[in-house]
Image: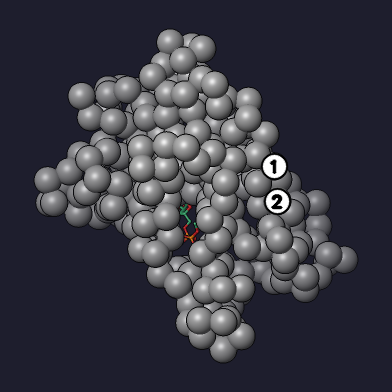
């Protein structure tokens, strides 16, 4: 039976690269998306063309209803034992200082970047923990280097949400370590994806790259490689750990 893997926000960017690589590594992949169905279907089509197994599942992970739908649809469509979750979906909003942030923005960021990840981790633990009759598994939380820098003048809210995700990684890794589940995080930064356009600066990586020790931005594939390694049995003694993918920053 194939191992089933849920990747939230897999219609583009880091999530899409991780979905393709995980499928190459033998996972049956639930390619979650929120709005961009065409992009998610194109990821699934690429996986099918390469001989892999995947299903696109529309669900807004910032709502409990969406999270429950994502997991029940994965159970129904992919049927194998859930072996992993990549908590990848995340949003940022236009760069601004704290005094200009209104409550609606803070609620959107914290719900999409913290609450949704807690709910997805909860549903994954219910299926994977040996305490609940599961066979164990692996969770990878996609954080950000911003959790350590705080992202001043740009997005303190986003940085704080990623710091919360890091706390989830540390605490949950200990809570479920004896139940066959490993929980780790990656902290990318300066990766060439469309998220920077959402922050109001599509060319952000190129603006910053001279200040990065490696003098370049990263690719979604480079982040996917770390995520798939953490998911795999090759990382079998690694839990509560983080891999920074930030060119030396
Ligand atoms: P991206 O290109 O903007 O892709 C975001 C993905 O998340 C899309 O597939 C989007 O789906 C999905 N998504 C957003 N809100 C969702 C929701 N409520 N429910 C379900 N799916 C949702 O982003 P990315 O750059 O690949 O980033 C992926 C992760 O890496 C994020 O957590 C981000 O914070 C983190 N990260 C990225 C960078 C970077 O430099 N790119 C750096 C540090 C951390 P739809 O388009 O279908 O709505």
User: In the picture, which quadrant includes the C terminus?
Assistant: bottom right
Report helix, strand or loop for mark 2: helix
- Name the residue carrying label 1: 167
Q: Position of residue 184 (x, y in %)?
A: 53, 43
Please give the name of the residue rendered at 39% of the width and 64% of the height, measured from the top-left corner.
222
Label 2 neighbour load within 10 Å: few <14, some 14-19, many 20+: many
Which residue is more in the foreground, 19 or 97?
A: 19
Residue 11 in sight in this render:
no
Q: Position of residue 38 (x, y in %)?
A: 30, 54
Report helix, strand or loop for mark 1: helix
Please give the name of the residue rendered at 51% of the width and 81% of the height, measured from the top-left corner.
214
Tell me the quarter of the picture where residue 169 sits: top right
Label 1 neighbour load within 10 Å: few <14, some 14-19, many 20+: few
User: In the picture, which quadrant includes the N terminus?
Assistant: top left
Q: Position of residue 191 (x, y in %)?
A: 48, 70
Q: Among all residues in the image, which is located at the extreme front? A: 237
Residue 88 in sight in this render:
yes
Residue 210 vertical position relative to residue 220 in the rendered view, above or below? below
| Relative horizontal placement of residue 237, taking residue 19 as reference (left or right) | right
Is the CB of the residue bearing disc 2 within 8 angstroms of ligand 1? Answer: no
Could you say which disc has been placed on residue 163 in the image? 2
Please give the name of the residue rendered at 36% of the width and 63% of the height, measured from the top-left corner.
221
Residue 207 vertical position relative to residue 70 in the rendered view, above or below? below
| Relative horizontal placement of residue 122, taking residue 168 as reference (left or right) | left
């Amino acid at each position: 039976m194939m191992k089933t893997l849920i990747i939230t926000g897999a219609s583009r960017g880091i999530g899409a690269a991780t979905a393709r690589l995980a499928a190459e590594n033998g996972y049956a992949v639930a390619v979650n998306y929120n709005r961009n169905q065409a992009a998610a279907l194109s990821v699934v089509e690429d996986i099918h063309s390469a001989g892999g197994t995947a299903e696109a599942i529309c669900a807004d992970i910032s709502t409990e209803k969406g999270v429950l739908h994502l997991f029940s649809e994965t159970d129904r469509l992919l049927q194998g034992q859930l072996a992993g979750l990549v908590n990848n979906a995340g949003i940022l909003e236009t760069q601004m200082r704290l005094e200009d942030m209104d409550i609606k923005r803070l609620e959107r960021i914290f719900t999409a970047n913290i609450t949704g990840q807690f709910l997805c981790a909860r549903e994954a633990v219910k299926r994977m923990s040996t305490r609940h009759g599961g066979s164990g598994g692996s969770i990878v939380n996609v954080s950000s280097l911003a959790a350590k820098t705080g992202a001043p003048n740009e997005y303190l809210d986003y940085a704080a949400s990623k710091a919360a995700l890091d706390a989830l990684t540390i605490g949950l890794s200990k809570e479920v370590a004896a139940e066959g589940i490993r929980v780790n995080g990656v902290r990318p930064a300066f990766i060439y994806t469309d998220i920077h356009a959402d922050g109001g600066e599509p060319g952000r990586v190129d603006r910053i790259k001279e200040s990065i020790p490696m003098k370049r931005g990263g690719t979604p594939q480079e982040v996917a490689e770390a995520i798939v390694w953490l998911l795999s049995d090759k990382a079998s003694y690694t839990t509560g750990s983080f891999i920074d993918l930030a060119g030396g920053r």
